[in-house]
């Protein structure tokens, strides 16, 4: 267990917001967590679990003890007739897991290539892209209760996955994804995640961006590696490079509305990008709603709306000076966007990242 005081968090959050952690503990296994909980100085203190820092907006210095998860390990647990079961330490980078599984001959994660963040964060917001969500490949996870120090395992139903949602995002009673139980926000530290990569592999090709690649390259039956490369190309063309421009990916969730609400919005603007879901509801493209309110390229201080994708807020000041957007500027911009989308379409956009 490595304990550091007054730690700059700018390198540890992908928005590159300047803030400090009063105390930061690097966690490389469950014994480190047990040691923190047993320590007379820290036992009972509030904690903040930090993975890759790719879904967090820091609005000031962090007083709770930051538990920086650095648990490593990638392995095949078992192979059944229907799936490869692989296990990854929570501190592994998600994209490294995608690359490793493909190299080992266990396809199934290729549509989720290049999603920033760590494996441990992936179930928290049920990451997803190009028609595949974590819940479609999830088997189980091991976690530790930060109040009692007890280890426990959850299956998919117990994680209560929803669109960018899970039991780990709620406090108190949860009723989501067919699950009723207690929320685990700030209560659990995820140690390891197991995924089931189905056999035989089947390509997921439904998304328009992927269908376009198939047409362009006259490739009707792409391999998993081919899909991986396309997804990397699509993401690189639309989303800012994290090494150059601070951001947390999509800043808002795509809202779901009823068919009547959608008809009302179409009456206001027939160009609204929308997708009909199996349950009769309609998903709207938040990026389109924000774009059509004229936000692309706009800024508040050094926080801005990305020029190529209005759903992504960026730090325009990430530079060698260590300055840049503050969390306050990011949230002021986010609130102004919410207000203008609400006034024009009657839809309240919900932020995706965690605001601390
Ligand atoms: N659009 C605009 N203007 C914009 C942005 C988007 O008109 O400025 C339109 C696009 O033309 C498209 C539609 O909105 O018709 C949807 O855009 P896109 O396909 O780029 O996907 P998205 O809805 O913006 C979601 C996820 C992404 C994921 C992609 C692909 C959410 C909140 N975001 O984005 O996930 O990569 O689909 O599956 O669900 C993330 O969560 O951080 C993330 C990047």
Image: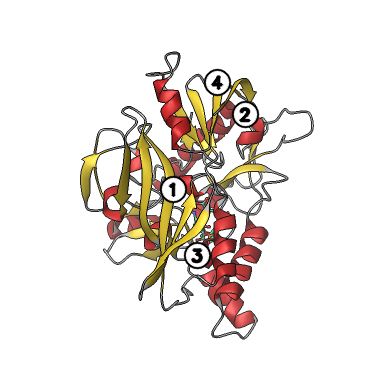
Horizontal side of 48 relative to 217 (left or right) equals left
> How many labels sit on residues?
4
* Element type where label 4 sits in the image: strand
* Snapshot quadrant of residue 282: bottom left
Quadrant location of residue 15?
A: top right
Q: Is residue 140 above or below residue 11?
A: below
Marks 1, 3: nearer the viewer:
1
Asked if the residue under mark 3 is in contact with the one under mark 2, i.e. CB atoms within 8 Å, the reply is no
Q: Residue furthest top?
A: 41
What element does badge 2 sit on? loop
C-alpha gap between disc 2 and disc 4: 11 Å
The location of residue 356, given as percent across then percent down, is 48, 28
Residue under numbered circle 1: 192
Give the mark toward the camera: 2 or 4: 4
- The reply to whether callout 2 and callout 4 are in contact (CB within 8 Å) is no
Real-space Cα distance between discs 2 and 1? 24 Å
Q: CA distance from mark 4 to mark 3?
A: 35 Å
| Position of residue 158 in the picture relative to residue 284 (left or right) | left
Q: Residues within 10 Å of mark 4 (few under 14, many from 20)?
A: some
Badges 1 and 3: C-beta atoms under 8 Å apart?
no
Question: Which mark, by number, is residue 57?
Answer: none
Q: Are marks 2 and 1 in contact (CB under 8 Å)?
A: no
Q: In the rendered image of this protein, does residue 326 appear above or below residue 41?
A: below
Q: How is the image coloured?
A: secondary structure
């Amino acid at each position: 267990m490595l304990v550091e005081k007054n730690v700059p968090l700018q390198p540890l959050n992908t928005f590159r917001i300047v803030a400090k952690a009063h105390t930061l503990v690097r966690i490389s296994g469950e014994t480190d967590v047990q040691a923190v909980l047993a320590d007379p100085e820290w036992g009972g203190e509030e904690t903040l679990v930090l993975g890759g820092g790719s879904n967090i907006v820091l609005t000031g210095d962090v007083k709770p003890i930051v538990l920086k998860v650095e648990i490593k390990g990638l392995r095949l647990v078992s192979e059944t007739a229907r799936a490869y079961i692989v296990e990854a330490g929570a501190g592994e980078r998600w994209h490294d897991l995608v690359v490793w599984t493909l190299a080992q001959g266990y396809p199934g994660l290729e549509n989720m290539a290049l999603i920033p963040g760590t494996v441990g964060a992936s179930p928290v917001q049920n990451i997803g892209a190009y028609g595949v969500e974590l819940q479609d490949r999830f088997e189980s996870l091991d976690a530790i209760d930060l109040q009692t120090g007890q280890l426990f395992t959850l299956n998919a139903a117990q994680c209560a996955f929803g669109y960018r949602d899970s039991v780990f995002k709620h406090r108190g009673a949860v009723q989501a994804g067919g699950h009723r139980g207690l929320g685990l926000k700030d209560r659990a530290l995820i140690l390891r995640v197991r995924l089931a990569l189905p056999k035989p592999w089947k390509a997921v090709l439904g998304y328009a961006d992927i269908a376009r690649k198939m047409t362009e390259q006259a490739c009707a039956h792409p391999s998993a590696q081919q899909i991986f490369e396309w997804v990397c190309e699509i993401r690189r063309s639309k989303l800012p490079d994290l090494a150059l421009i601070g951001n947390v990916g999509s800043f808002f969730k795509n809202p779901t509305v009823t068919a009547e609400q959608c008809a009302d919005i179409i009456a206001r603007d027939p160009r609204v990008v929308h997708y009909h879901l199996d349950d009769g509801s309609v998903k709207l493209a938040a990026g389109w709603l924000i774009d059509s309110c004229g936000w692309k390229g706009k800024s508040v201080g050094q926080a801005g709306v990305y020029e190529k994708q209005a759903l992504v807020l960026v730090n325009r000041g990430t530079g060698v000076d260590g300055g840049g957007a503050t969390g306050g500027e990011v949230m002021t911009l986010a609130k102004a966007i919410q207000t203008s989308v609400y006034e024009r379409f009657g839809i309240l956009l919900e932020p995706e990242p965690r605001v601390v």
